[in-house]
Amino acid sequence: MKKKFLNIIAAVSLLTASSCTNDFEETNIDFSKQVEANSENLLNPALYEMASEAYMRANNFGFEIMQYSIPFPNEGNTVSRYYFTENTGVGYWNSTYRWQMQINEMLKLAQKEGNKNNEAVALVLRAWGFQNLTDSFGDVPFSEAFRQEENIRTPKFDQQKEVYIQLLNDLEKANSLFGLSETLKGPDQMYHANENAAGVLKWKKFCNSLSLRMLLRILNKDGEIDVKNRINKIISDPATYPIFTNNDDSAFVLATGVAPFDAPIVRPQDFTTGRAAAEFFVDYLNKTEDPRRPTFFSKARELGSNKDIGYKGAPAGYKSGTKFTYNPSNLNQALAKTPLTLKIMGYSELQFILAELALKNVIPGDAKTFYDKGVQASLEQWNAKSTPEYLNHPDVAYNGTLERIMMQKYVALFFVDQQAWYEYRRTGYPKLPNNGGLLNDGKMPVRFMYPPVTRLQNPEQYNAAVQSMGGDTYNTKVWWEK
């Protein structure tokens, strides 16, 4: 057993490399200390660390690139100014492969054990992790990853289209595997399905809701992949393909503050050090008198007098030499204090997905109804009161446009890993301002460059991927963007 796990670690080392980044420092597992391995022991560590990494991806990358918050005061080269290097995504690449290695082992063990529920959960978590990875990089090692024991030391980079096809097929299979009369074997920090079989149904709902997220992402590739028919297959048969029906179904993992479920950020003060809330985000919530403001932000203060001036952010990418007469609002430190939820996918996001699909006549139903449910669900998720006045505000009320749906979806995706970045690349919304200090000619970078280790350790497959993608820059579009 020890030799087997050492071989797995060796396989992961071919895909990862250390780097100096601000990414979440991933925990290393000492597999050599595991005398007996089974699928039920592998779920919680991988699930919790993947969810923690998702939280930190929002905190370190998603907030900056999508103008939720910015480094402040700072006039240097940062992600918020569209400054990317070949190392920008290295930490994310490393952590994804590290924990997907454990999910891969969980999958194989569950299949060997005949444990269908654990097999289904492993397929769902693999789909979640690899969709985010391919949306961040494009073509990635997938079908030949973690196959060191088969002497595959230089895994090929699967084209993004093929990765999507396999992941969607995996989710279809997972949906068929879930047995709703049995509990999950082994601890489950997300749905506690080991304690109650109702949690297994929630895993199944997450499976199909995730499918809809993936299918919407590639909607413009209908024809290459049977996207619209797959969507309607799910929507038209809720008995076979259940999806989220309320906030309680959301795929959120609880950080209790009690080991091993500690907060991703050890000291809450580190969450707010050297940062400010971004003007774009704050201004929209001010304009709409959004009741989530006190949950998200602290108040700004006038310099000198320290007078409370309400919620006021700092402009992203502000010009060098800009003078501020106030200390901007910051993010609320409570967002980093336990107990807190680590967000994978929420019910509100699903409602905005359905609203867009209805708007585009892909599915039956009223787009306004889905939209209103999405807004209400996000408010309730953050313990903010949903009122008719808010829903009827002229800058909130549904107006039949994709831009309106995406603006509220942007708010709902606050703290959901990098989803707002992916959705901006897909739709161009929300329309983010250029305040004069953005690099890359003011163009949003659309992917991470491959880690340098891939060029050094796997040059043949790296070069094939670069040729397939049309380059390896942060302006090289992935398949679904083309």
Image (spheres, rainbow, N blue to C red):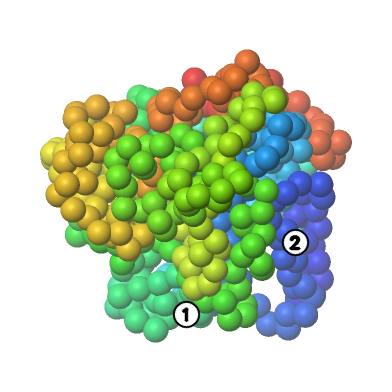
Q: Determine the image quadrant of residue 143.
A: top right
- In this view, the residue farthest toward the top is 441
Image: 465 above or below 120:
above
Residue designated by label 2: 8
Query: Which amino acid, by three-letter code, is at mark 1?
Result: Lys
Which of the two residues, 371 or 176, is positioned nearer the viewer here?
Answer: 371
Point out residue 462 in the picture as x, y percentages from the top left corner: 75, 31
Point out residue 231 in the picture as x, y percentages from the top left corner: 28, 40
**Residue 163 visible in the shown view:** no
Which residue is located at x 37 percent, y 48 percent?
A: 412
Residue 435: which disc? none
- In this view, the residue farthest toward the front is 305
Which residue is located at x 56 percent, y 48 percent?
A: 305
Which of the two residues, 472 or 366, is positioned nearer the viewer here?
Answer: 366
Label 2 element class:
helix
Label 1 element class:
loop
Task: Characterize the local packing of mark 2: few (<14), some (14-19) or many (20 or more) Cα atoms within 10 angstroms.
Answer: some
**Residue 17 visible in the shown view:** yes
Point out residue 265 in the picture as x, y percentages from the top left corner: 64, 63
Which of the two residues, 281 or 85, is positioned nearer the viewer here?
Answer: 281
Apparent side of residue 337 relative to residue 385 in the rendered image (left or right): right
Apparent side of residue 261 relative to residue 471 in the rendered image (left or right): left
Point out residue 158 in the picture as x, y percentages from the top left corner: 61, 36
Image: 477 above or below 30:
above
- In this view, the residue farthest toward the right is 456
Q: Earlier in the sequence, mark 1 or mark 2?
A: 2
Q: Determine the image quadrant of residue 337.
A: bottom right
Query: Which amino acid, by three-letter code, is at mark 2?
Result: Ile
Which residue is located at x 20 percent, y 34 percent?
A: 394
Residue designated by label 1: 185
